[in-house]
Image (tube, helix red, strand yellow):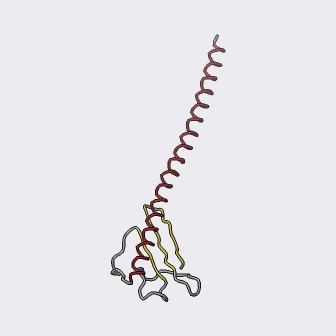
Amino acid sequence: MQKQRGQIFLMTILTLSTVLTAGVILITIFTRDLKLSSETVTSVKSLYAADSEVERTMYYKFKDQYPDLNIQDATTTSCMNPTKTPTTLVSACPIDCEKGSECIKATGLIGKISRGLEVDF
């Protein structure tokens, strides 16, 4: 009778450890997926911030009116080719445009995620 109790106890421990291991694995997978999905939303937001900054910069460029250089949005930065335009919106911005073209680069930053766009024309 005591041999059966020992076997039942051993089977119970093995079953519980298997269930516990499966639970930890599932929690790890779901936590990683939730983190990735929230980063995807943040990535899209930062891409839209960069896109709006490109649109704003193009508006100022084609209107030949440039905003005060000391005013910058905390979430976006942009710059233009200094050889083609009289002013850059962000000083010390690296520009690598093709020869003879103009370009605008913008970076959107939301949280720790940044996305950038470059427009050549």
Residue 121 percent coordinates (x, y): 53, 79
Residue drawn at (50%, 69%) of the image: 116
Residue drawn at (48%, 64%) of the image: 47
Residue 62 percent coordinates (x, y): 42, 81
Front position in the image: 89 or 66: 66
Could you tell whether 22 is left or right of 34 in the image?
right
Count of number-bearing discs: 0
Residue 69 percent coordinates (x, y): 36, 81
Which quadrant of the rendered structure holds the N terminus?
top right
- Vertical side of 70 occupied by 24: above or below: above
Which quarter of the figure has residue 71? bottom left
Front position in the image: 63 or 105: 63
- Vertical side of 42 occupied by 117: above or below: below
Residue 17 percent coordinates (x, y): 59, 31
- Vertical side of 80 occupied by 12: above or below: above
Which quarter of the figure has residue 85? bottom left
Front position in the image: 12 or 85: 85
Residue drawn at (49%, 89%) of the image: 83
- Outermost residue toward the top in this view: 1
Front position in the image: 93 or 59: 59
Could you tell whether 68 is left or right of 99 in the image?
left
